[in-house]
Amino acid sequence: MTRKEILKDVKKVLIKIGSAVLSGDNGLDLNIIEQLVDDMVDLKKQGYHIVIVTSGAIASGKHRMGISGPLKSMPQKQAAAAIGQGRLMRVYSNAFGKHGIYVAQILLTMSDLTDRKRFLNIRNTLTTLMEWGVIPVINENDTVAVDEIKFGDNDQLAAMIANITETHLLINLTNTDGLYDRNPNRSKKAKVIPIVSEISDVIEQAATDETSDVGSGGMKSKVLAAKKVTAFGIPYIIAAGKEKGILRDLCAGKERGTLFLPMKEHLNSRKYWIAFTLRSRGKLTVDDGAKKALIEEGKSLLPSGVIDVEGDFHVGDPVLCLDTGGKILAKGLTNYGAEEVRKIMGLKTSRIQQVLGYKDYDEVIHRDNMAVDKELQHK
């Protein structure tokens, strides 16, 4: 199957633009931004819906303040982002405005996406903007984000936005031609891998975690994002963002960059949200019988299968399910808090009422609120 055939039904494209692509002599490379905007306008005329996840606020702010080299503290990064974000949006607004297209700024933190109601509100807003023909320009709200609410980098933010928008294709534009089979900075024999059908250990080892002074996500982060996106059934491309016509060529199915094929059996939106957006609040170790029920039989987790509880979680919190060897089997939303599970673990469902004095649910975690997937081993 050719790239053209794989991408023939794509109409909604999420484009993540990294700092290494956007940064230039003036903090932002205005020529590159104009070049990418021209591509996106052309795609829009062809009927594509475009959503942008952009870096560049910190790079722009650093230039304004005459700072060279990496920033050393979180307050410095937040201050630089506060200075640079307005200019970044103005540059996008002016570039698209020449073509009569409006843009909308959306700044997010992880807490915006972990709350299901806010998650759905963001989805509704993005859907409306696209219906209006407006291009959403999304960035992490760096001015308020701290470690507990940070996505990590915009590669991970883009992976989560792919789920929210149910995009058909995610293009990650960076400063390399794609994923190489070995580090191109250390080997002249390094070659770009054109297609990745499965993200194996070999593929992961080929990705380095080197970053630039203006970026936070190396190739390793991009491959991790690819694992999340393809688990939702979305193709994912890593390509060089400064190459002329790159977006038009990629959407036309031309062999540029590295294409990660979507998994054939993939998670639905809710289970993807549980698996990759929510951060676990505790751990449940299960016995071999429960492991078989979860993995092979597609069943819920009952109290009888739980043999150990770790953490101080509450009803509705995301928790990991582990086997006796410590291997992650699943992640799900618990029906009972940690202290309740400690009291009923190992017991039959019929005894929950007797021990707790009430029984809201038969299951500790219902199958509908659980993601069981091999990719969870990497969370």
Image (spheres, rainbow, N blue to C red):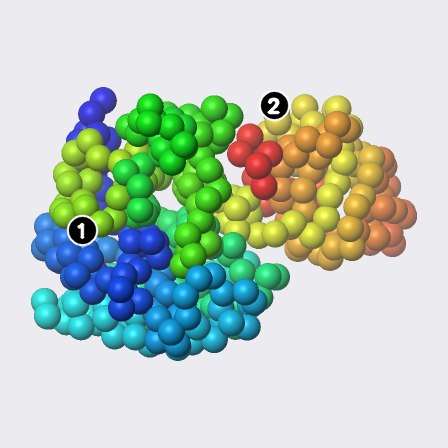
Residue 302 sits in quarter: top right
Question: Vertically, is 151 above or below 283?
Answer: below
Q: On the image, numbered disc 2 is attached to which residue?
A: 296
Q: Whole-percent x and y of residue 196?
A: 36, 27
Q: Residue at x 43, y 38 (%)?
A: 223
Distance from Cα at disc 1 to Cα at disc 2: 40 Å
Asked if residue 196 shows in the view, the reply is no
Q: Residue at x 20, y 65 (%)?
A: 30
Residue type, label 1: Tyr
Q: Residue at x 41, y 70 (%)?
A: 67
Q: Whole-percent x and y of residue 3?
A: 21, 30
Q: Residue at x 23, y 22 (%)?
A: 1
Residue type, label 2: Glu
Residue 214 sits in quarter: bottom left
Question: Vertically, is 217 above or below 83?
Answer: above
Nearer to me, 375 or 187: 187
Q: On the image, numbered disc 1 is attached to which residue?
A: 48
